[in-house]
Image: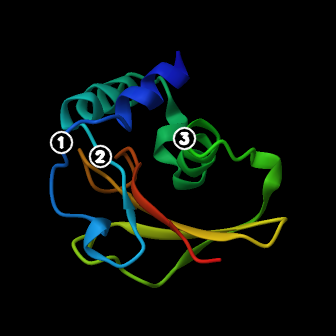
Amino acid sequence: MALVVLVGLYGCAPQQEPGPQKNTGWTEVAIDTGKAKLLQEEVDNGHRPGLLDPHQVIYEFLEGQLKISGSEVQEIKEVDEKVKGLPEGKVIQVTLHDGKVLQLSLVQPVRKGPTGIWQVEGYRFLK
């Protein structure tokens, strides 16, 4: 079921606001606001707490969308770089064991703060 939810979240839904596609090298990941609200309700009701953890959201995205196993991840760290259009988001850099490096931009589409879910809005490979 989680895979179905992930496919639904990152499918072809319209983007809520301008995102990382404005920056060189970023691949946009559309966020369906309606589905994000439903996921937020699930979390508020005690289900899917992993959506509150940016690192867990990244692992699910890597495995579900990019087909990169969590065992391939060497390091995950937040970087100071802000993506244009995402003043309240996070940019997380992931280094893989094979030397590839990618960045993912995350936003909280429904609610900001510790009780808001995170979703990937875009990603780019640096090397």
Viewer-proximal residue among 28 and 35: 28
Left or right: 111, with 106 as reference point:
left
As shown in the figure, which amino acid type bears the numbered disc 2? Ala
Coordinates of residue 13 in the picture (x, y in percent): 23, 36
* Quarter in which the C terminus is drawn: bottom right
Earlier in the chain: of badge 3 and badge 2, it is: 2
Coordinates of residue 39 in the picture (x, y in percent): 35, 29
Asked whether the beta carbons under mark 1 and mark 3 sit within 8 Å of each other, the answer is no
Q: Which residue is mark 3?
A: 65
**Quick one: label 1, few (<14), some, or many (20+) residues within 10 Å?**
few
Left or right: 71, with 49 as reference point:
right
Left or right: 98, with 13 as reference point:
right
Q: Residue at x 38, y 44 (%)?
A: 117
Q: Residue at x 46, y 71 (%)?
A: 91
Left or right: 81, with 28 as reference point:
right
**Quick one: label 2, few (<14), some, or many (20+) residues within 10 Å?**
many
Viewer-proximal residue among 76 and 62: 62
Coordinates of residue 123 in the picture (x, y in percent): 46, 62
Asked whether the beta carbons under mark 1 and mark 2 sit within 8 Å of each other, the answer is yes
11 to 38, vertically: above or below: below
Gap in Å between the C-alphas at discs 3 and 2? Answer: 12 Å
51 to 120, vertically: above or below: above
Q: Residue at x 58, y 36 (%)?
A: 64
Earlier in the chain: of badge 1 and badge 2, it is: 1
Numbered tag placed on residue 14 in the rendering: 1
Gap in Å between the C-alphas at discs 1 and 3? Answer: 18 Å
How many marks the image carries: the answer is 3
Viewer-proximal residue among 117 and 18: 18
Q: Residue at x 32, y 77 (%)?
A: 23
Viewer-proximal residue among 80 and 13: 13
Q: Which residue is mark 2?
A: 30
